[in-house]
Image (cartoon, rainbow, N blue to C red):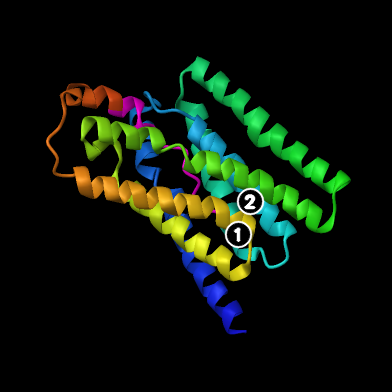
């Protein structure tokens, strides 16, 4: 009983943190709406996070005791759908077409296929395991996306490539959900979030090492690289 109460409390904290992560790109979209242009921002992170949230909502709805996972990712579906819709409104025509194709393939086609196959061909724990495996695989890929930014920080000795707040939330979010997964004995939640926690820890260590370091010669291209790097929002999954 005590363990169940602790896991619920930890899950609530995880939900709060995940909501903050889902809302973190609001500044980006304020800029997009204000300028009526998506500029150099990319839609792929939001399309992928919408896919991720959809899979984990389905997982939470399928698994007994998965209410906390389902509710926060259901909120994620709403938020990411708004982001994608704004992107479709303000992106140039070619980018809008590409984004629409991605949404159709990933957020509609793939999710519909995943639900249909698991509902028709699988049942019980096998179905839950298949959904969890898909979600975990996508999570690991998304959690691994900041590795390029970490490499850039080491090469240029500039932490601007790796915003502290995003690194901190990656650390915090991965840690709290890995702990929750440990409490409820959920392997599919634990592995990707454990990886996210380790990557977040590594990013915070890099930040501490290089925040006062003398910039390398690569810093002359800082502004241009930032526009093509982390300003586009990395593929970091808010939860799972």
* Position of residue 133 measured from the top left corner of the image (x, y, whole percent): 68, 47
Q: Which image quarter: residue 114? A: top right
Q: Taking 95 as reference, is 113 above or below it? A: below
Instruction: Report the span colored magenta.
Output: 226-240
Label 2 crowd bin: few (<14), some (14–19), many (20+), radius 10 Å: many
- Residue at 48% in and 43% down: 143
- Which residue is nearer to you in this view: 91 or 133? 133
Residue topped by disc 1: 69
In the drawing, does residue 171 fall left or right of residue 77?
A: left
Residue contact between numbered discs 1 and 2, judged by CB atoms under 8 Å: yes
* Position of residue 58 measured from the top left corner of the image (x, y, whole percent): 69, 51
Label 1 crowd bin: few (<14), some (14–19), many (20+), radius 10 Å: many
In the drawing, does residue 28 fall left or right of residue 81?
A: left
Residue topped by disc 2: 56
**Element type at marker 2?**
helix
Q: CA gap, disc 1 to disc 2?
A: 7 Å
Q: Taking 210 as reference, is 187 above or below it? A: below
Work out whether residue 200 can be spotted: yes
Q: Is residue 192 magenta?
A: no
Q: Is residue 230 magenta?
A: yes
Q: How many marks can you see?
A: 2
**The N terminus - image quarter:** bottom right
Q: Taking 183 as reference, is 129 above or below it? A: above
- Residue at 30% in and 40% down: 162
* Position of residue 158 measured from the top left corner of the image (x, y, whole percent): 21, 35
């Amino acid at each position: 009983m005590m363990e169940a109460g602790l896991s619920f409390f930890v899950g609530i904290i995880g939900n709060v943190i995940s909501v903050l992560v889902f809302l973190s790109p609001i500044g980006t979209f304020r800029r997009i709406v204000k300028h009526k242009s998506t500029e150099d921002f990319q839609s792929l992170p939001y399309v992928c996070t919408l896919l991720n949230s959809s899979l984990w909502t389905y997982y939470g709805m399928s698994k007994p005791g998965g209410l906390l996972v389902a509710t926060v990712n259901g909120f994620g579906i709403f938020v990411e759908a708004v982001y994608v819709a704004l992107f479709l409104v303000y992106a140039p025509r070619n980018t809008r077409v590409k984004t629409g194709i991605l949404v159709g393939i990933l957020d509609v086609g793939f999710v519909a296929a995943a639900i249909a196959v698991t509902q028709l061909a699988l049942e019980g724990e096998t179905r839950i395991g298949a959904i969890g495996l898909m979600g975990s695989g996508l999570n690991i890929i998304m959690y691994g996306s900041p590795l390029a930014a970490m490499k850039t920080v080491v090469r240029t000795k500039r932490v601007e490539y790796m915003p502290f707040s995003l690194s901190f939330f990656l650390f915090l979010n991965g840690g709290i959900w890995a702990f929750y997964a440990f409490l409820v004995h959920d392997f599919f939640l634990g592995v990707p979030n454990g990886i996210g926690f380790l990557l977040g820890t590594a990013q915070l260590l890099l930040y501490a090492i290089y925040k006062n370091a003398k910039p390398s010669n690569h810093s002359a291209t800082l502004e241009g690289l930032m526009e093509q790097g982390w300003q586009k929002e990395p593929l970091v999954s808010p939860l799972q």
